Amino acid sequence: MQIPRLAVPYVALGLFALCRPVLAQTPADPPPQIVQPGAPGQPSRAIGADAARDLSHVQATPADVAFMQGMIHHHSQAVEMVELLKTRTASHDMQLLGQRIEISQQDEIKMMQHWLTARGQEAPDPNTMRDMPGMDMPGMSTPMMPGMLTPEQMKQLAAAKGTAFDRLFLEGMIRHHGGALTMVHDLFATPGAGQDSEIFAFASDVDADQRMEIDRMSSMLKELH
C-alpha cells in the first residue's frame, strides 16, 4: 500500500523521535558556596545557608558597644594632636598628613556616634572626654585605650615646634595607631564580638587604614632622622 504524500513528513518526524538518543539527566549543580570573611590576619571559612541566615541576625555585644565608645575616645585624641600640628609644623607633608587624619577620624567619630545612638547606647562627645581616664573594656584582655599619649606627653608635644614637633608627632601617632590595632585585635579575640556586620566592616577598615598610615609615617620619620 502506498503511503499518501502528505503523511510522509509526519512519519519521518515519528522515526526521528524514536531514534533520538535519550539525554542522561545530570544531577543539579551544588548550591553556591557562602564564604564568611575572617578577622584581620585570619582566614575566611565556608559556612552553610543556615549559618549565614543566623549571622544576618547577629546582635551587637557589650564588647562591641565598649569598642565603639572607646574608639571615639581614641580618635578624639588623634584630632587633638592634629590641632597642635596646624600651628607647630613648617612641613607641607606634615600638614597633608594631618588633614588626612583629621578628616578620616572625624568622619568615623560621627559614624560611631550614629551606630551607638541607633542602638540606644550612650554616644560619647569627644569634647568632654579629653582627660578621661582609661577604663577596662568588658571581655578584653588589655586596657581599652592602648597607645594613647599621657597628659605629660601631650604637654611635651604642645611645647615643641618645627622639626622637634614633627618627630614627636610622628612617634606619638605611630604609637597611637598601634593602639588602635590592639583594640581591633582584642575585639575580634573576644568570643561573640565583632560579628555585627557594621562592626566587622568598620574594625576591618580601621585595621587596614591604620597599618597603611603607620607605614607612611614610619617613612616620614626616617627622613627626619
Image (cartoon, rainbow, N blue to C red):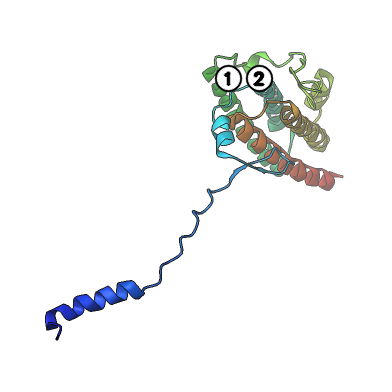
Quick one: 131 or 120, which is closer to the camera? 120
Could you tell me the amino acid type at mark 2?
Answer: Gln
In the image, 53 versus 198, the foreground residue is 53
Horizontal side of residue 5 vs 191, given as left or right:
left
Which residue is under mark 1? 116
**Closest to the observer, 52 or 189:** 52
Horizontal and vertical percent for residue 6? 12, 79
How dense is the environment of label 2, judged by Cα within 10 Å: few (below 14), some, or many (20 and up)? many
The residue at 75%/32% (across/down) is: 185
The three-letter code of the residue at mark 1 reads Leu
Q: Quadrant of residue 41?
A: top right
Residue 72 locus on image (x, y percent): 66, 23
| Callout 1 secondary element | helix
Are the residues at dot 1 and dot 2 in contact (C-beta closer than 8 Å)? Answer: yes
Q: Is residue 112 visible?
A: yes
Residue at x 26%, y 73% (from the top left corner): 14
Quarter-wise, where is residue 139 in the image? top right
49 versus 7 height, above or below:
above
Label number found at residue 69 = 2
Q: Which mark is residue 169?
A: none
Q: Position of residue 76 (x, y in %)?
A: 67, 23
Q: Is residue 91 visible?
A: no
* Element marked by disc 2: helix
